[in-house]
Amino acid sequence: MVGEIASSYSPVLLIFGFALIAMAPTLIISRMIAPKKRSNPVKFLPMECGQVPSGEGRTHFMMQYYAYILMFVVFDVMAIFLFAWGTSMLELPRTATLPILAFLGIMFAAMAYALHESRRRDIW
């Protein structure tokens, strides 16, 4: 029993061992090639497109596309599950329609919430 389990994990252990063996020389060579001293302190400053950053790092902005994002997520998940259900619909029993109707109800409730949020925030 133990031998069977160990033999099933042997490819994983071989790949892990190869990764360790391949990683060691690359780390050693990079340490040998890397520059030892910091020649120019400007090189180590944070930059934004070659310019020294100015101002606050975090700013307040409106979430005007919040409803679009929610609706994209809802339609994306709905499309995945409806495609899977639709491709196997002929082989499924009739009782398999009830869970998909419940799923669609939950998805349309999420869509109604997204529309409610967009109206409340006066986005559209």
Image (cartoon, rainbow, N blue to C red):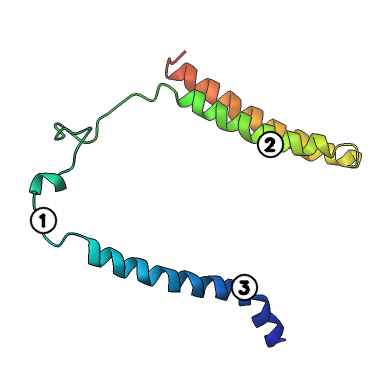
For residue 59, side relative to residue 12 (left or right):
left
Please give the count of numbered marks on the rendered protein. 3
What residue is shown with label 1? 38
Image location of residue 56, percent across then percent down: 17, 33
Residue plotted at (17% across, 59% down): 35
Distance (Cα) linking label 1 and label 2: 52 Å
Q: For the residue carrying disc 3, how many other residues have a C-alpha within 10 Å: few (<14), some (14-19), or many (20+)? A: few
Q: What residue type is labelled 2?
A: Ile
Mark 2 packing: few (<14 Cα in 10 Å), some, or many (20+)?
few
Task: Identify the amino acid type marked 1.
Answer: Arg
Q: Residue furthest bottom?
A: 2
Secondary structure at badge 1 equals: loop
The label shown at residue 11 is: 3
Q: Residue sitting at 10 percent across and 44 percent down?
A: 42
User: Who comes first in sequence, dot 1 or dot 3?
Assistant: 3
Tell me the kind of residue under disc 3. Pro
Q: Nearer the viewer, mark 2 or mark 3?
A: 3
Give yes or no for contact between labels 1 and 3 (Cβ–Cβ under 8 Å). no
The image quadrant where one finds the N terminus is bottom right
Badge 2 is on which residue? 80
Circle 3 SS class? helix
From the viewer's perspective, is residue 115 above or below residue 49? above
> Residue 103 or 45: which is nearer the viewer?
45
Q: Residue at x 53, y 25 (%)?
A: 114
Depth check, front residue: 12 or 26: 26
